[in-house]
Amino acid sequence: MVARSDARPPDEGQYDWPYPLKWNERRLVDGVDVLVFGGGIAGCWAAIGAARSGAKVALVEKGATLTSGASGSGCDHWESAATNPCSRVTPEELTQAMLDDNDGYNNGISHYIECREGYDRVVDIEQMGAKVRDVDGEFEGAEFRDEQTQLLFAYDYHNKFSLRVWGTTFKPALYRELRRAGVQIFDRSMACGLLTEGGEQGARVVGGYGIGTRTGELVAFEAKATVLAMSRPTRLWLFIPDLPGLSEFRPPQCTGDGHAMGFRVGVEFAMMEKSVRAEWSGDRSFPPYGTGNNHNTWYACSLVDARGQEIPWLDRDGNVVESVSDRYRPAPGQKFFIKGGCESNYPSYHYRGPDTPPVKELLERGFELPFYADLPAMPELERKAIWGLMVGQEGKTRIPVLQAYTEAGFDPHQDLLRGYGDGWKSAVFDPNERQLFGLPGGIVNDWHLKTNLDGLYAAGDQLFASNCHGHAAATGHYAGRHAARYARTVPAAAIDQHQLERERMRLAAPLERTDGVGWKELACLVSKVMQECCGEQKSRALLEEGLARLARLQEGEAQQLYARNPHEWMRVIETLNVLTNAELVIHACLARRASSKQLNFTRTDYPEMDPDDWRKFVTVKKRNGGIEVGALPIDYYGALAQRYQSENQDYIEGTWKKT
């Protein structure tokens, strides 16, 4: 352990900061087998998987691991638990449905891992003390409750592969297990960069570095293997300077730091050209799941129009579903459907709800705005499952929705809750106000969840086509296991001190200024560029203009940023990462020279939709000062079950644990 103690004291009267400042101190943490960047769901599980494999593990988290991450405040359901004892769907069937449902533009490897190992993690977290079963009999007699196992099911009550859970109990249980497993936790420490062998782009990753968000101390980590387990990029198209906490669906600190770190050292990305119109963002949005609707958490709530007329549910074939119970069951001849009310290009897995027709069509049929969620019309246990279990356990719903609405007098037994936007959403957004949402782009992975760089693995939201809580948990544990296996085969490699010094100087420049350009100003400018140059309609001219404007921001305003304390320094580094991720997205958009329905991608200069020669994953990575464009076949993952089995015999046989 090496440290320097020549910290620079703050100027007298400059600011009142409650923690000791260590601006110029450096600390080296060595002897680490597996370094995990990110303490959300994927990161916690990666650290646990690696530790159980016998590795010495360090976990670095920007917030507090006890409650941090997109699911830190809870989750209401665990998707794709295909191996639970009540499931009628196999992991192979469910994964193939996910692939088909997205016209192949999905991550077959990570979602097979999700379906194959998801229920294993449910059992694990229950053993850690979390609540996953209705052990108190609160929902006894409900159609969605299995009386023998006490498991509760969501969406498809016949096939039973998605579980309703008490997700607010998960993060504390994971934190206790991390401590029990001996994982070294670095809370309030922002991961800032990856370090490579010889300091070369594209070389083996030998660790990383970060800063203390309270002290400003620089901490470097030497590690045999590293797992990126941070959030997908946010705040690219939308940023509200006065209300930054409302700028995205995910927590405001989820800014895609791992994507930016990876892009800088040569990690390969896929599907970064995909984006969707924003739904939960900005100052016009209600809290997620805080308006009347019938999606996900609210599935399958009844909807009525302004006159109290019920909007009928339709099945896959367009037939009216007569009972609430039948909303949770496949249509005649349909094996199963994926999630509640999802849109699908494939009728095999399509289940229509009252929101499937456009609002215009509903109005033409005689319905009148506004629309309302009609909880009082639902059967008692269904109402209780939506309002109180699903709303209340899903992230960001316990306090701002369930508690706040209840304290304001909302009574689900008698009150309707209005929908907004397109009749049931939280707001209406401009087509150029976009998000990386709904299986967005991310890092390319192999069957070890290894990136294209030796020593570097990825999990959860870092992966391309990432999804839900269950996906994060399963891929996190898997990546941790395989990173630990790799670490046993390689010697430690020393950090390149020249690379570390270059990175320190890059980050430290804002500390030399006490005024100039604030991080919020730069964030607003980046979002403006993305809205104007990388919105719904794209073209080469627009995208190249966007890159030029981002380059001017990098050379201009970004060089005038200032930070007066470690918290502002963290926000500055986040915003520089947002700038890097904006560049990554635009390069990906330039690389795909065809439009694509499934990717929500429209090139006005290449208007043909999904031509055969562009049915592939387009990849981008940095190399030698430029951008290297590549491609992968849509089915590059191969035979799912066979490939999984060939790479995971120790897990299948139960011999992988070393502790």
Image (cartoon, rainbow, N blue to C red):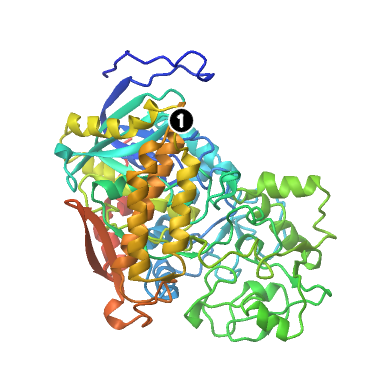
Horizontal and vertical percent position of residue 278 = 54, 61
Horizontal and vertical percent position of residue 176 = 49, 33
Q: Which residue is mark 1?
A: 515
Q: Is residue 306 left or right of residue 390?
A: right
Residue 198 to residue 348: above or below = above
Residue 608 to residue 589: above or below = below
Report the front residue among 624 and 658: 624
Report the front residue among 173 and 62: 62
Q: Is residue 107 visible?
A: no
Neighbourhood count class around disc 1 (C-alpha, 10 Å): few under 14, some 14–19, many 20 upward: few
Q: Residue at x 20, y 34 (%)?
A: 499
Q: Is residue 520 visible?
A: yes
Say which quarter of the image contains residue 647. Answer: bottom left
As shown in the figure, which amino acid type bears the numbered disc 1?
Asp
Say which quarter of the image contains residue 148. Answer: bottom right
Q: Residue at x 68, y 55 (%)?
A: 290
Horizontal and vertical percent position of residue 416 = 80, 63
Q: Residue at x 41, y 45 (%)?
A: 230
Q: Pick the quarter of the image with the N terminus.
A: top left
Horizontal and vertical percent position of residue 438 = 48, 63
Secondary structure of the residue carrying tag 1 is loop
